Image (cartoon, rainbow, N blue to C red):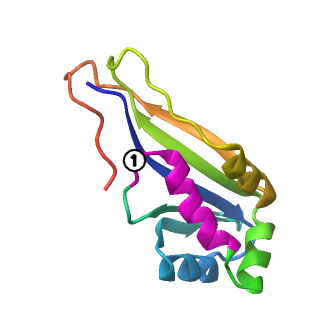
Amino acid sequence: MSIRYINTDLDLECPNDLSSLAKDLEARGVFALHIEQAKEGHWFARFETEEEYIDPETNIAAMLDVIESAEDSIQRLWRECSLREFNIGYDCGDEPWAFNQGLSNATLKRLAEVGATLRFTLYPEDKTTGEEPAKKP
């Protein structure tokens, strides 16, 4: 199995209802995979772009374009989130021998300026079946 970039999710947690933020993002191409209110009253949401990208740099840049251009009320709700995390996902494998992708300093600066964090998730091959991990819808 080959190592490959899957996509980047945007995970949010907020004490306030994220429905208006979700509606605004979805109107501009960043879709909610799920949005829910937890028992503690906090809201959780996971977003991703409908478009598939070949690397995290262009995927994150597209989501940042949407976030940075949002109206003031959406920007305010964004800042109220206690979690604003871009989660980069990869399928792992044993080839090629070396694999790397990166983020430019410009993208890292944009992430910092919107108060976002970065996480990496590595999905291993299922060794019991020899199958690749399930792909996200």
Is 62 part of what is drawn in magenta?
yes
Of 56 and 121, which appears nearest the observer?
56
> From which residue to which does the magenta span run?
53-68
**Residue 91 found in image quarter:** top left
Identify the residue under disc 1. 54
Could you tell whether 91 is left or right of 20 in the image?
Answer: left
Is 9 part of what is drawn in magenta?
no
Could you tell whether 132 is left or right of 48 in the image?
Answer: left
Majority secondary structure of magenta residues: helix
Residue 89 image position (x, y, % from top left): 47, 41
Q: Amino acid at mark 1?
A: Ile
Q: Is residue 79 above or below residue 107?
A: below
Specify the quadrant that holds the N terminus. top left
Q: Can residue 122 be seen in this snapshot?
A: yes
Q: Residue at x 73, y 56 (%)?
A: 110
Of 61 and 16, which appears nearest the observer?
61
Q: Residue at x 29, y 25 (%)?
A: 126
Could you tell whether 51 is left or right of 37 in the image?
Answer: left
Residue 48 image position (x, y, % from top left): 47, 61
Specify the quadrant that holds the C terminus. bottom left
Q: Residue at x 80, y 68 (%)?
A: 79
Dot 1 crowding, Cα within 10 Å, few <14, some 14–19, many 20+: few
Residue 83 image position (x, y, % from top left): 72, 55
